[in-house]
Amino acid sequence: MKGWSFAVLALAGTAMACSLVPGAVAQEGVHGVTQARPWMDARLSPDRRAALLLAAMTFDEKVALLHGPMAMPFGPFTLPEGAVGSAGYIPGNARLGIPALNESDASLGVTNPMLVRGGQDMATPLPASLLLAATFNPEIAFRGGAMVGDEARAKGINVQLAGGANLLRDPRGGRNFEYAGEDPLLAGIIAGEAIRGIQSAGVISTVKHFSLNDQEHKRMTVDAVIGEAAHRESDLLAFQIAIERGDPGSVMCAYNMVNGVYACENDQLLNRTLKQDWGYKGWVMSDWGAVHSLDAFVRGLDQQSGEQLDPQVFFDKPLKQGVADGTISQARVTDAAGRVLRAMFANGLFDKPAVRQDIDFAAHAAIAQAQAEEGIVLLKNDGILPLARGAKRIAVIGAHAEAGVPSGMGSSQVTAPYRESPLLPVRAVPMGGEGQMAMWANVIFHPSPPLAAIRARIDPAVTPAASPFAPPPPSRVTFSPGNYPAAAAQEAAAADLAIVFVYQPSSEGDDVPDMSLPFGQDALIEAVAAANPNTIVVLQTGNPVRMPWAGKVKAIVQGWYSGARGGEAIARVLFGEVNPSGRLPVTWPVDESQLPRPAIPGWGQPADTTTRIDYNIEGSDVGYRWFARENRTPRYWFGYGLSYTSFTHANLNVAGGKTVTASVDVTNTGKLAGKDVVQLYLTTRPGGPARRLLAFQKVDLAPGETRRVTLTADPRLLAEFDGKAHGWRIDGGNYEVGIGPDAGDIALRKTVRLSAGTRRP
Ligand code: BGC
């Protein structure tokens, strides 16, 4: 919003004596209480309420809202008094009834870092956000978000550090599992809907990490270099769409530099783009340990989080000194505090404080399972799937399938209560590179074992062993841990079919060094496939991986990190109880040689060296756009995914003008009900070929059913960003668009005429 400022209304220092505690205020409602605290009148707009409250605040009270510590015992630091225990804490104000901010990670569920709330504090782990993006289903993203918001409230947490919207630019990214893929439209919609879901529960959500935190390796010192147009058309567009759809109360700025300036003190990013161009009304909080100077405050950062991790608590005494010296204005302090308060009012933090209550874990696990079932992607099927329940003898192999499904690692990891898993004790693994995040790199398997789920379908009468020390029950489904390829091959040879589970750990804090499957799992698959021609591979990875064995197995299922009920979801897909409908949210390269940067920038360089990543190589042509532009053929394109039924698209009609609207008939031509993802792409613009996802919709069709689907493009996807004119520009002329099953197969095409137009940034 232009001209956003609370300064006019602020009567700094007008302290109103009042002894009410926040909870009492909220419950007593509008009358009576509002005379002393007029901002508690919920009929007023959040802007008005924030302005009224600011008018009652002293300068020091405003500054107190602008910084806070970690909310867990960490090294010499103890849990701040009054904090629930989570990632971060901003103390409240009893005099004015301002609730404290208890801030917890993340998109995948409510975390319990370092078991700060005790080993019994459980939360429901959702599948990876990359799996969520593979659902292409905004509604299911909203439901997951609402579930996380609900659990956060039940734990007394009112800020969820969620909404990962960074683009997947490299299939080795350690944090890609927390993000929503390579395309700005898909990532923006999925992250935006998850944020909207969280906030529907009365909990503020962030969107993060603004911007270009697309590489974990050397994330604290890396300089992401990109031209303005390319940035606006890619990563920034993902954030812009997520913010428009989700209206997050806060934006978390990133660790890395953007064009030579740290993201948390980047005037171009925070003041000009986010606050001025986009009119963002919420507040910018720092990532934990991402603040390098007091200048950040003038350059757009409103709040210093996890302040012990920075060289100084810049946003306390130094900030006050800056105001006293006249280098920082009072108005800017009021503006920053007002942004925090406004978001708190807008999301009900004053009116409906988070209250501890019981959680319906069964209902919530069902949401996690529904996401997993829609986001698992069938990559290859030579007719072996779905499995018949009458299958005689199945060899299940590898990846701790007897224990559960892997989770991604780092601050987003939903920890409790699985640390106490009797089957697979948690190990802290120092990751590659600098190993700086070893504390977080816990190998955790959520206890939803695929083995048990498969056995239940083949031998329903067999009950699982009561303890890890009991002998395994007799079953037609055998299990081999897969540590030794020869032993696994022996099991496979004795079975009718083999299902090999493989996994790739990936973590916040560093990237995986390359696209290979670790732990000798390629050799395991090769050995099993050589022993049994009916081999199925279930991948559980945070990224695309090399698959040298792809031609030798009958089916490949991408299970990602599948969350609380992942094993059940995988089994339901394998047995056809669920018809797979996930589509890849990332292009799957054959190997690293096809990437814009075959080697990870900075890999092997000493820690602390500044590494430059030149994102201008691909610019805004991320993922499938890069492959299309360079005429490279990946193993699988963005949007790809098989089904147990088949779909056709016909009768494409397109209309032009200011944007493109396309209608198409989708028919389920197979014998099973199934869901298709109708994808509309731009293929040519007046300047030449261009590949961009313009719109998508998931449709559920009965066998033989035809539905007409109409899709309208967000005009920014047809435009170029014009730096000189400072806005989006659509050139008048002919545009070719098309419908196809993925970004590399767009057979049904039509040309449409668009009128020239511009749009504000
Ligand atoms: C991560 C953030 C997270 C924060 C608090 C940081 O290391 O980058 O995503 O929200 O820690 O746990």
Image (cartoon, rainbow, N blue to C red):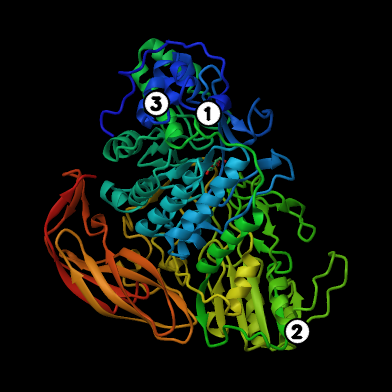
Question: Label 2: which residue?
Answer: 490
Q: Is residue 246 left or right of 571 when viewed as pictured? A: left
Q: CA distance from mark 3 to mark 1?
A: 14 Å
Q: Nearer the viewer, residue 738 or 686?
A: 738
Q: Give how far across and how far down residue 678 sits, in percent.
A: 35, 71
Question: Label 3: which residue?
Answer: 49
Q: Is residue 202 above or below residue 55?
A: below
Is the residue under label 2 in contact with that under label 3 (CB below 8 Å)? no
Question: Label 1: which residue?
Answer: 26
Depth check, mark 1 against mark 2: the one in front is 1
Q: Is residue 113 left or right of 591 when viewed as pictured? A: right
Q: Is residue 644 above or below residue 326?
A: below
Q: Secondary structure at mark 1?
A: helix
Instruction: Work out whether residue 295 can be spotted.
Output: no
Which of marks 1 and 3 precedes in the sequence?
A: 1
Q: Nearer the viewer, residue 153 or 590?
A: 153
The kind of residue tagged 1 is Ala
Crowd class of label 1 (few under 14; some 14 to 19; many from 20; radius 10 Å): many
Q: CA distance from mark 3 to mark 2?
A: 70 Å
Instruction: Work out whether residue 97 can be spotted.
Output: yes
